[in-house]
Image: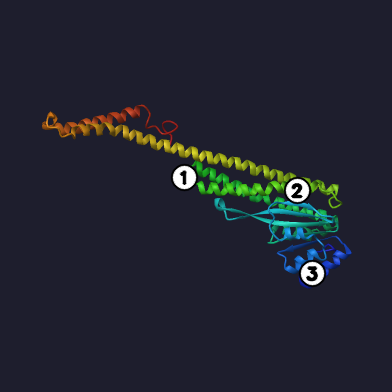
Amino acid sequence: MPDGSLSVLDGAQATQAVRSWVEEEPVFWLDLEAPSEAEWNLLQDPFGFHPLSIEDARSLSEFAKVDPYPQYLFVALHRFVLQGTGLRAELRLGEVDLFLHRSYLVTVHLEPAQEIEQVWRRLAAHPQLMRRGPEFVAHLVVDAIVDGLFPVIERLVEAREQLEDQVLERSEENPWPEITRLRRTFLTARRSLRPQSEALAHLGRERRGLVSDGAALYFRDISDHADRLMAIVENELRLLDNVVQMYLSLRTDRLNLVMQRLTMVSAIFIPLTLIAGIYGMNFRHMPELEWLWGYPLALVLMAAVGFGTYWYLRARGWFDPPGGPGRT
């Protein structure tokens, strides 16, 4: 509001008030949440914003950006919404659009944004902040949006650590779906953060009489925060790749252990199969077939060969678990 107070306007009252503000050019901030068609029309008349910027505000932009127009700056910034908990959390992108004029700031978002609520409560508690101008209010909004990204990224980092612990514990549950989902989430975050960092850096350099040198310093500081977020996401992607390699290595190790055990079983039973095969041949002239103790002798021979092979392999360390005796 021009007098520094904050209120909610609707319908014809909002249209009349906005028209008078635009004509008188006081310093004010107008926030439109899920605008109606009448509210969308306000952006074109009386504000006179370019149709291309209004069109961008009506839908989710693929990338964050800063577009300079003759009388104002159009800024589209992404916000993160994390749905679900733990390893099943899904990242969804939201957007807040800013129209920064030398006398006012207009923000538009298609769904509720807690970042806007935070700035709203701060200005309600300290209405004198509005006197610092639209660019300062824009800084508060942009700063709240970027700061709101940190808790989301921290939850994703915790999910990656949980996934890493699950892989290290060699859980029987297949972690591959969670790995794929989390990697896709980090890639979505990186694809959004990279142009957002560039847009904020551009905002810190923008002048055109809309961003003063003092305000540019604040925007450059926010750009540094976005760069730090980008570095965290890049590092998490590398760590997630390490989790993938670790999981594949553990699977290979487990497969090698199974093959080793099968080899030991085969090494024990192949000699027994040989003995049974020889005494199972029905040739006429086989003196052992007529022996009274031939059958018990064959069993004793097979048992001796089997246990002898077992103790030989055990002495060579074939039965020791990976990592040496006493390891599991």
| Lower position in the chain sequence, tag 3 or tag 2 | 3
| Residue at the outermost right position | 24
| Residue at the outermost bottom position | 12
Query: Above or below — where is 187 with respect to 114?
Result: above
Q: Provide the residue designation for mark 3.
A: 14
Looking at the image, do the residues carrying marks 2 and 1 touch, with CB atoms under 8 Å apart?
no
Q: Provide the residue designation for mark 1.
A: 171
Question: In front here: 199 or 235?
Answer: 199
Query: Above or below — where is 18 with respect to 328?
Result: below
Classed neighbour count for the residue bearing mark 1: other residues with Cα under 10 Å, few (<14), some (14–19), many (≥20): few
Total number of numbered labels? Answer: 3
Give the CA distance from mark 1 to mark 3: 59 Å
Query: Type of residue at label 1?
Result: Ser
- Tell me: 242 left or right of 172: right
Query: Above or below — where is 99 with respect to 252?
Result: below
From this viewpoint, is residue 6 visible? Answer: no
Tell me the element at label 3. Answer: helix
Question: Where in the figure is residue 68, as x and y percent of width and height?
Answer: 80, 52
From this viewpoint, is residue 282 visible? Answer: yes
Between tags 2 and 1, which lies in front? 2
- Tell me: 325 left or right of 61: left
Question: Residue at the location (34% across, 29% down)?
Answer: 313
Q: Provide the residue designation for mark 2.
A: 200
Question: In front here: 123 or 57?
Answer: 57
The quarter holding residue 237 reads top right
| Lower position in the chain sequence, tag 2 or tag 1 | 1
**The N terminus, quarter of image:** bottom right
Question: Where in the figure is residue 67, as x and y percent of width and height?
Answer: 78, 52
